Every structure is written in structure tokens, then in C-alpha cells.
């Protein structure tokens, strides 16, 4: 029963997973797999030391099995296979009162603001659970959380069948957004500079271009008969992406900000005025996005096994972070939390 | 029958108003008044010399009377008092085909891309006309065009009764947006640095603060019980306004870009992500906005006479531009196009 603790200063150490009995409204889970997210890497690099209680177990892209059920928990039983929607909202702030609990003003993100799932035993609130269909493999289920992000983004972007969609940035989230939008029937184009990611996108049947080789605005203009794209997803978080996004959309088109912009880029607000563009931010997910993600994954139409670059034991987590930093050809690495 | 011609190089010269007979789908108008818009000043300063066919009569905030009616024109007669919605769209571009003719990709703005209304006789397409109610004064009617801008902005911002609204910038358009939003029942706050404009806003019964004296984010936070504003209108076009706007809105709140940003400001895209904010551009108006503006003005609930700072003859237009540039306490100046 091991756990990977973040100790600050780019250091992960393996310790014991503390088997905390569930409170009345909680369940204890045996974690099977937990994917490594960009946010985890950001924590590893020290970017979130103010929120993380060092030493702390992090990780939130998990799948596992219920081991124990708290006294008040109804509708869940030991042995059920589940994923966790890792959000705890306050219930009283203006966002919660307006029905937007996922962007609660006092939101706690499990695995950042509370202990996470890079461990074999994890105790979490029962209200965060989503049930997996029978036979759904737990390694693929560890991808449900990032798929739910993509489902949320595509839903808020109101993507419809036949629409022209451009995704700027072809990492795991960008690729998933492209796949979810394509599954709806949108004509999707990915803009990405990394050759490995370009190749993978094309292998998935998606159209993909390198904006360093192709004039993206010109390409999208021609592709859309001069109109511009209906929806652009900015997933790169780069100044170049922020500069390009306004050049791609049609009059009244939508731009969805998915990326976390660490710095404020320059944005062409004149184009927003001139073409009455819409920009909207999309963060995490709501319960329906998890249900949609599970449904999509269960139908077997997403190339999930190809998105998993590697499966590694807990004891490798330090090395995995270093490899992701150094690598240009890793998509999703899963940590086998039972493996040592 | 005089006209004021823009000759480039900050020069207005008075010449003859050419009484052009209406084409089959046009009307010839006797212009009564034409307001001086920020766009006219921008033209005077040389900022639109690529679009203006020098020497050209400019001006578009007009009110007047129909003098002659073209052969195909139905439903209009000489003697009727009207205003012109000064837009000519192509009818075939992607924006027109999508029902957004006011942001046509090939939009011609009458008075910029074609001759304008700083003259006593003006010939315009009949489809641009809106009828004034009986007895409506033609000086106040010259304000219909900027009121229609405000109606469009407030409509796209989906302002509802009881909502918290902040307007950044209290010039003519900002004030009109505030007045239109207040008339719907919104709780409106104006942010403005100019003491004359602050005083005028307060005389109109609007709450107004100087962001150089008051921490606007803090003020709006307290005013909204910690939630943030529902809608912010950015009408200043300043880097400071662009930096502040994201600090004022609640989760899922709306920011409407009304100003013309000549330079790309830095924008806090992280806040868009974090609070799922919406940003939308709003440009000119649609026919329903003109009808709403006429209806609002006719009900006498807008302090229109107080918005008119001065009435001047055509021959003063050069001086008026210079005075608007130098002044801090002019709102709307009307040109009496029959006066010499």
C-alpha cells in the first residue's frame, strides 16, 4: 500500500498510503490507475506550492474500485468500479448559488487542495463518484477525467454537426477536444508544431497542420470558403495562439479558452468588435460531462489505447515527471498505483 | 445648399451640396441636423484616409425629411421625417448569409465609404430609413443613431432587470449604454476619469466613480455582495480598461467590447478560464436597435436635450472638430446643416 508524496523542490518520494476509513459521506477506493496531468507537472515544478500541503500525495485522473462505503452513503457498494470527479465546492458562494458549482469561488480540487490519487488507497466524497459500465477497463477509465474536460469544452463551445472547428494545440486535451468535436460531426483541424503530435492526430483521422509551415489564417479561410471557422479552441496557452485565434473565426464565431495562460497575452479586441466575436472560458467539468465522457469511451469510438503512451509503477513517478519534461513524444502516462 | 467637405490633412472646406436625384431604390433627404461622432473626428485626424474618397462629405448621425422618392420606393413619401441607419451590406458574404448583415464582410458605412450627411441635401438607399413619430424634434432625432448603438450593445449583452452593470467609459456612447441599461432596470455604475462626465452622469441619476480615486474592483465586489458584476461594457478603448474589465465580472459574467481598440491590449485570459467569463464584441446596430432607440427616445425617458452640448452651423465644422479635440466638457455637438 504505497503512495507517491510531493515534497516540494521537484521531489517525489515513495511512502505509505494511509488507509483512511471513509467518513459518513465518503467512500474509500482502491485506486487502479492514475494518469499524469499537466497540472501534476506544474505542481512538480513548484508552480502550485501555495495550494499544496507539502508533503502531499497529488494526482486526480484516477479509476478504481470502491473498497468501503461511509455510513450515510446510499446507492454505492464495495466492489463497484468508479471514477472520481475531483471537485469539492462550498455550496454557498455566488457561483454555487447560480448553479455553477464547478467554478465555485472556494473550489477545492482533490489532489491539489486535498490529498490525491497517486496511491493505492484513496478516500473521497461519495458525491464525486461516477459509475463505470460493466467490463470497462480501469486503465482506459483513467482517461475519463481528461475526456470530461474535452466534453465540457465542446459543450460550452456549442459545437454542432457540420461546423468548422480549429483546435490550437494538439496535446492530450487538444486531441481529445478534436476527437469529441469530430464525433459530433464537426470538420476539425488541429494546429500543432510538434511532429509526433501531428502524426498521431493524422493517424486518428484528424486533419492537422503545422502553423510554422502553413499560414493558418489563410488555410482556415480557404477551408471555410472565406467565412472563417465557427469555433476555435485555444489549448496552447501561447502568445502565438492568442494572436492567431482571432484571425481564424467567422463573424459571430466562438473562441473557447481552454489553456491556462500563465502570462497575459496581447489580444486583438478590435477583431472582437469588428466581427462581433465571442470568447468564452471553459474550466474543468460538470457532472453531465463525466457521464458524456463515460458514454463516449464506452462506445469504443475514441482511440484511448493509442493515447496511453506508457504505464509505470508508483515508484517511477519522479522519473516520469522528468521524462515528460524532456520528451516531445509522450501523450498520456498512467501510473499503476498497485504496482511497486 | 451647402456641404462640408473633408479634404484630408485636418481640413474641412465648405462647398456646394450636390442635389443628387434619387435612384430607383433611393430617397433624397433634406438633412436637418447631423451629430459629430468620434468616428468623424477619427476621419478628421486622418485615421481613415484609406476609406474616404477625399474630398468627401462625411457625417452619419442625421435626422431630416424626405424631399424626393425614387421610382421603385414603396411606403415612403416626401415630407416624412426620418433617420438613416447608415449601413449598406453586400447580401452575399458569409455574414449576410448568416443573417448578420450589419457586420457584412464588405460593409459600406454611409458617410465613410460613401458621401455623408454634413450637407443640406443627401441621397440614401430607402432600405436604410426609419420613420420618426409625429412631433419628434429633428435635433433630438440626430441622437437616434448613437442611441441605437447603445441599444445594440445592451441587447447583445443580454442585460436584465436587477442585474449589476458596469460601464467603463462615460463619453456619449458609454452614457447612453448606462441610460438604456438603467431603463431596463439594471443597477448601473459608470467608471470615468473626466470630472465633467462624472458630474453629468450623476445629474442623470447614474452612480459614477473615478477609478483613479476609487479601487473599482473592490467597489464593484462590495456593491455586488462579493459576486462581481453581471455585465461590463468596455467603452474606453484603453489598456487600463482592458486590464480592469476581467476583475469586475462574476463567474460566467459577460464583458461587451464596444470600444474600438486601436492597439492590442494585454488581456487576462486566465480569468476567462478560471471564472468561465464571456466576452463579446458589439458593432453598430441592426434594424430592431433603431426601432428600439426611436421608441425609447419618443417616450421621453432619456435626457436627450442635456446630451446636446451645442448646435453649430455647417461652416463651423472645422472649428468644432478642433474644439472637441481640445475640450474635456463636450458631449454631443449637432451640426445644423441648413444653417450657414
Image (cartoon, coloured by chain):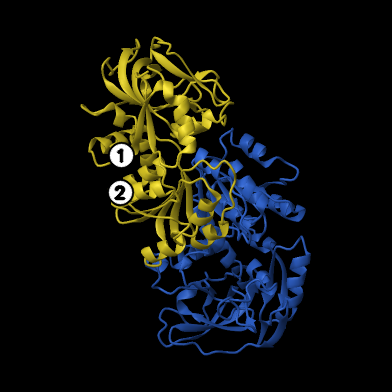
Chain colours: A blue, B yellow
Asked if disc 2 and disc 1 are in contact, CB closer than 8 Å, the reply is yes
Which chain's residue wears label 1? Answer: B
Q: Position of residue B283 (x, y in %)?
A: 46, 38
On residue B203, the disc is 2
Give x and y (percent) for residue A50: 60, 76
Q: Secondary structure at mark 2?
A: helix
User: Subunit of mark 2?
Assistant: B
Q: Quadrant of the N terminus of chain B?
A: top left
Report whether B255 appears left or right of B30.
Answer: right
Q: Residues within 10 Å of mark 1 (few under 14, many from 20)?
A: few
The residue to which callout 1 is attached is B306
Residue located farthest toward the left when viewing the structure as drawn: B134
Alpha carbon distance from label 2 to label 1? 10 Å
Q: Residue at x 51, y 80 (%)?
A: A124
The picture places residue A103, in percent across and down from the top left corner, at: 47, 66
Same subunit, labels 2 and 1: the answer reads: yes
Vertical arrangement, residue A272 with respect to residue A43, above or below: above
In the figure, B303 relative to A199: above or below?
A: above
Amino acid at each position: 500500500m504505497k503512495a507517491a508524496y510531493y515534497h516540494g523542490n521537484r521531489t517525489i518520494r515513495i511512502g505509505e498510503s494511509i488507509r483512511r476509513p471513509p467518513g459518513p459521506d465518503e467512500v474509500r477506493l482502491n485506486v487502479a490507475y492514475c494518469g499524469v496531468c499537466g497540472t501534476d507537472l506544474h505542481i512538480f515544478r513548484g508552480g502550485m506550492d501555495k495550494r499544496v500541503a507539502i508533503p502531499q500525495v497529488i494526482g486526480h485522473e484516477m479509476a478504481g474500485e470502491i473498497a468501503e462505503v461511509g455510513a450515510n452513503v446510499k446507492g454505492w457498494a464495495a466492489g463497484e468500479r468508479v471514477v472520481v470527479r475531483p471537485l469539492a465546492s462550498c455550496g454557498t458562494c455566488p457561483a454555487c448559488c447560480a448553479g455553477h458549482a464547478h467554478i465555485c469561488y472556494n473550489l477545492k480540487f482533490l489532489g491539489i487542495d486535498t490529498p490525491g490519487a497517486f496511491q493505492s488507497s484513496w478516500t473521497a466524497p461519495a458525491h464525486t463518484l461516477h459509475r463505470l459500465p460493466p467490463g470497462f477497463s480501469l486503465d482506459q477509465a483513467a482517461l475519463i477525467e481528461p475526456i470530461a474536460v474535452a466534453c465540457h469544452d465542446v459543450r460550452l463551445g456549442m459545437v454542432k454537426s457540420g461546423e468548422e472547428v480549429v483546435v490550437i494545440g494538439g496535446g492530450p486535451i487538444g486531441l481529445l477536444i478534436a476527437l469529441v468535436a469530430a464525433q459530433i460531426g464537426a470538420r476539425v483541424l488541429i494546429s500543432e508544431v510538434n511532429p509526433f503530435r501531428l502524426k498521431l492526430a493524422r493517424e486518428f483521422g484528424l486533419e492537422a497542420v503545422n502553423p510554422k509551415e502553413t499560414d493558418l489564417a489563410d488555410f482556415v479561410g480557404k477551408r471555410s470558403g472565406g467565412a472563417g471557422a465557427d469555433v476555435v479552441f485555444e489549448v496552447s496557452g501561447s502568445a502565438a495562439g492568442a494572436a492567431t485565434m482571432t484571425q481564424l473565426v467567422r463573424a459571430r464565431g466562438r473562441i473557447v479558452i481552454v489553456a491556462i495562460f500563465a502570462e497575459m497575452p496581447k489580444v486583438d479586441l478590435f477583431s472582437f468588435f469588428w466581427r462581433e466575436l465571442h470568447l468564452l472560458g471553459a474550466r474543468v467539468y460538470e457532472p453531465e460531462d463525466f457521464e458524456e465522457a463515460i458514454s463516449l469511451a464506452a462506445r469504443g469510438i475514441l482511440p484511448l489505447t493509442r493515447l496511453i503512451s506508457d504505464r509505470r509503477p508508483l515508484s517511477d513517478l519522479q522519473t516520469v515527471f522528468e521524462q515528460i519534461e524532456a520528451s516531445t513524444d509522450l501523450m498520456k502516462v498512467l501510473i499503476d498505483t498497485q504496482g511497486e
